[in-house]
Image (cartoon, rainbow, N blue to C red):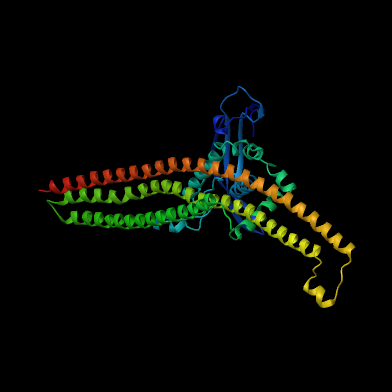
Amino acid sequence: MMDSDDTISASSHLMDSLEISILEAEKRANPVLNIRDFFTAYLIETKLKDDEDRSKTFPRISLIWRRYSEFEQFQQYLQGQYPHVVIPPLPEKKHLYTWRNQSNVIHDNTDPDFVDRRRAGLENFLHRIASHSVLSQDVIFKDFLTKEFGWNDSLKQEGYIHLVESKLKDLAVLSRSSSMDPKFQQIAHYSKQLENNLDCILKARLKLVEETYVIDTLHTHIGRLFSEWSVIEKCMGDGLQQAGHFIDSVASSTEAALQEEDVIADQFKEYLFYASSIDAVYKHHLHLQLQIENLRAAAKFKSEEKERIQQGKTTLMGRLFGAVQTPEVRNEKIAMLEKSLADDETRIADYEVSLKNFSELALQDFSRFQKQKDLDIQETLSSYVVEQIKAARRGLNTWTNIKHCIQTIP
């Protein structure tokens, strides 16, 4: 659904020219083999900020629906097209690090609270791409934002998605290189440490949340006991009842506060998932390095084979069967090996150029990622501290009121 055919000029960041929002999520039914299969669709809105200086086609306003699977498909495309970039991760598809009160919806990916948090995560994913100087200029990205249907037709026609999936599977089983760049070894080590540290933080936070929820839930029972006790007391009745109400509020305010914390936890999860993107960059570098090493090993073997033939040496099988090579046969084999060696040298040179260019771009983008991560983690930690301060103040205020109720008992 589009308003006009307006355009925008290319800028270093698409977010400079566009407002991108996911307005809502909608639960839909998709009948499959007579089974009601539900999925969630997300409404993406893009708005043009400035009408001036336009050279690239982009609608003034666009509203389109996307499924989570389409986001996954688009992310896979980015991973294949821009292997040197730390590609932004998608939010979790299923519940992770779920605390007690969420256990009843742990297998329900259409739970409204979970869907809304995933909506915010998908919107953040789009903002990350639109804020990237390279990814934001991708033509497929613009189609993803503005074309309801057919945005991935070119990928399907060229079998691109299948190639990317195959490539990602190959990267997952790579062996180690004997001459890996130390900078990329550090990146690989960093990705594992980042993932491990954030995983431990999220698990520790989960335990803390569960303990807090259990303790504060017990206050509900204490509050009820105070209320029941107040019935049989004449002088203390009012004070006990008021204190009981305040104790009840301890538990009721805790759940809302913990849900606010879930939003902060999602920000930690984003960087937990970023670890896989960092590792993908390392593995692509490793893939190029291994290609060069394999080609060099093959060239060395062919060179030794050429030297053996030139010296008139025969193979073990040739000696066993008494095979004799004529000068013509030897010259033909030498010529074939020389051609193959020349091809290998060309391929090695091409891979070395690719490796050099990839390394420069990857290190540059990793530096960009580190700056982004430092700012985001600092902001997330600050938000967490602010939430704890708010909780402490609420608790102090509540317990002060409880103290006042008890002290006013005649």
Q: Quadrant of the N terminus?
A: top right
Q: Nearer the viewer, residue 185 or 243?
A: 185
Which residue is pictured at 76% across the width and 55% down the height? Answer: 341
- Outermost bottom residue: 320
Q: In terms of depth relative to the viewer, which is nearer, 197 or 156?
A: 197
Up-down: is 346 above or below 305? above
Does residue 287 appear to the left or right of 337 in the view shown? left
| x and y percentages locating residue 256 in the rendered image | 36, 47
Quadrant of res 380: top left
**Can residue 110 be seen by looking at this rendering?**
no
Residue 322 lies left or right of residue 92; in this view the side is: right
- Where residue 159 appears, x then y in whole percent? 73, 50
Which residue does the image show at 24% across and 48% down from the upper left? Answer: 246
- Residue closest to the eye, 128 or 304: 304
Tell me, yes or no, if residue 295 can be seen here: yes
Residue 32 horizontal/vertical position (percent):
65, 57
| Badge count | 0
| Up/down of 386 relative to 292, above or below | above
Q: Is residue 384 left or right of residue 370?
A: left
